[in-house]
Amino acid sequence: MTEKEQQLWDKCVAFHGHACGGLTIGFKAALYAMELLNAGFSDDEQLVCISENDACGVDAIQVVLGCSAGKGNLLFRLRGKQAFGFYRRSDGKGVRLVLRPRPEGMSKEESFAWMQARTPAELFEVKEPACPLPEPARLMTSRRCSVCGEMTMESMLRLENGQPVCLDCWHPYTRFGL
């Protein structure tokens, strides 16, 4: 690891709370995304990540790339895969990084050391993104739910008997059990 990469890794460990294989996956994915997309830390939404998991690696992506749920440039498309889509908003270029299988039979410690020793290109297969670049985050008006009274973003309300109802209070029409 270069000195700069070591400093970033140390920040990731401090943020996450401990060093582990999962954090390594996200760290190496973030470094590879920076290389492939010629990108750096995202102050706003210049870079977008769609994570297909909600595991440890996501913490490294937040630290290294500045992608966060609050800014709207870290989104989850949960598929239970160690895969991450990265997009450069300026031109829409995107890549999907999919973790390659590790050798079988390694202990947790051996697996961690193995991943730490690999380059990002050795760890990840580069594919086309699984979905298109999401639109930028929008600010939306909130309205009061007619049942619980809580303010809810308009796009998350449903109409029930002509009244706005939040998803927690809404009674979906499930006549066919779908």
Image (cartoon, rainbow, N blue to C red):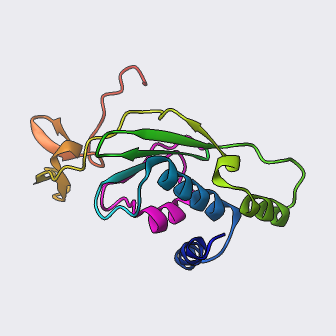
Question: In screen coordinates, is 175 left or right of 146?
Answer: right
Residue depicted at x 24% and y 50%: 137
Residue 83: x percent and y percent? Answer: 57, 44
Residue 40: x percent and y percent? Answer: 41, 61
- Image: 82 above or below 67: above
Residue depicted at x 56% and y 78%: 7
Q: Nearer the viewer, residue 144 or 75?
A: 75
Residue 167: x percent and y percent? Answer: 28, 45
- Give the quadrant of the C terminus: top left
- Give the quadrant of the N terminus: bottom right
Q: Nearer the viewer, residue 170 or 143?
A: 143
Q: Quadrant of residue 57?
A: bottom right
The stretch drawn in magenta includes residue 76: yes
Q: Nearer the viewer, residue 59 or 42?
A: 42
Residue depicted at x 64% and y 76%: 18
Question: In screen coordinates, is 76 left or right of 32?
Answer: left
- Res. 133 visible in picture: yes
Magenta residues, as a range?
Answer: 51-80
Question: In screen coordinates, is 26 left or right of 130?
Answer: right
Q: Quadrant of residue 5?
A: bottom right
Residue 175: x percent and y percent? Answer: 35, 22
- Image: 59 above or below 173: below
- Res. 50 visible in picture: no
- Image: 87 above or below 4: above
The stretch drawn in magenta includes residue 133: no
Q: How many marks?
A: 0
Q: Nearer the viewer, residue 41 or 73?
A: 41
Residue depicted at x 48% and y 33%: 130
Residue reaching furthest to the right: 105
Residue reaching furthest to the top: 176
